[in-house]
Amino acid sequence: MEYKLGEKSRCAVIGYGSWATAIVSLLVRNEKEVWWYIRNDDVLEGLVSEGRNPKYLNDIEFDRSTIHPSSDLDEVVSMAKIIIMAVPSAYLKDFLAPLTVSLEDKFVISAIKGIIPGDYKTAAEYLHDRYGLTYKQIGIISGPSHAEEVGRQKLSYLTVVCTDQDNAHLIGNKLGTSYMRLSFSSDIYGVEYAAIMKNIYAISVGIATGLGYGDNFKAVLISGCAREMTRFLMESYPDRRDTLDPAYLGDLLVTCYSNYSRNRRLGLLIGRGCTVKSALNEMTMVAEGYFAADCIRHINFRHRIDMPIADMVYDILYRNALPRQKMKELAQIL
């Protein structure tokens, strides 16, 4: 069965964090109305009464006539053809728990950059298995695009990934603006896993920074991260992909060096001496790399791919390994 989208296909966004808010800010520039599922009473009230998200990117003021924020998930899903999931992977199940209407005639796009904890599946894999969606009706959007810069209308980049490139370009038309450059791909597996793995690697760079390593070492470390990510993608799911493209290398780089990167910040806190537990408690937003480190290690049991950097991050996060000692050992083999 073909899933062809039309230009008038309405969009809905699931989630109320910074990335969800940034995505809505793009959509409303091209769409007459956007439905928006909000699971937080304060955020819902702020959007309804003032057109602002009081918790995330509150500098963005929405035209209240173009957004339809609602706490009724069934209503939001029923009103749209294109459903964009923009929630932390750890909470996807909770967000979708109230859903009683079917997704079988929807086109679902994941803007999630993490693996579902406990299921060891990406968002696309989970939606496919749990809701019976075919990969012809699943898409991915990936960066490099930090929500904060998108919200400030800084020049940014999105890759839209669909098996059908007509659908990809139609979705791109809904997200494109003068400050958002678009590229397109059909590599659902590679782009989604790259978006997940770059969070693990950003933690490693944060740890190195917190430990006092300089730019020279971090350049070598990030080069090693790029090689390791490419090796994992090509050995676990061979395809004709160029991992130098923005959706792979670009997203990795910005997550490793940007001050907006919550995963880099988690590593930075650990490198400076915080325990993993205290570092997580200090984070105001979810660091997807924490869950990804465990999930990727579990998934790699099947493939047995050499991944010393990801292994180091796992050992520090989950085995109480000493960051300075593990980084010193890693430096010997990079």
Image (cartoon, rainbow, N blue to C red):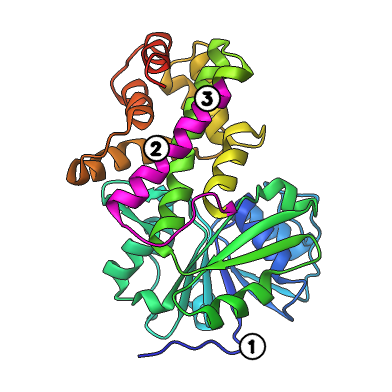
Q: Amino acid at mark 1?
A: Glu
Question: Residue 26 is drawn in which quadrant?
Answer: bottom right
Residue that label 3 marks: 220
Q: Earlier in the sequence, mark 1 or mark 2?
A: 1
Along the line of sight, which residue is nearer the eye, 128 or 67? 128
Percent position of residue 256, x then y: 57, 34
- Give the main secondary structure of the magenta stretch: helix
Which residue corresponds to the image point at 32% horizontal and 33% vertical from the top-left? 307
Q: Quadrant of residue 141?
A: bottom right
- Indicate yes or no whether the magenta region holds residue 23: no
Q: Earlier in the sequence, mark 3 or mark 1?
A: 1
Whole-percent x, y for residue 24 in the image: 67, 65
Q: The residue tagged with tag 3: helix, strand or loop?
A: helix
Tell me the magenta residue range.
Answer: 218-246
Disc 1 is placed on an element classified as loop
Residue 38 image point, x, y percent: 57, 61
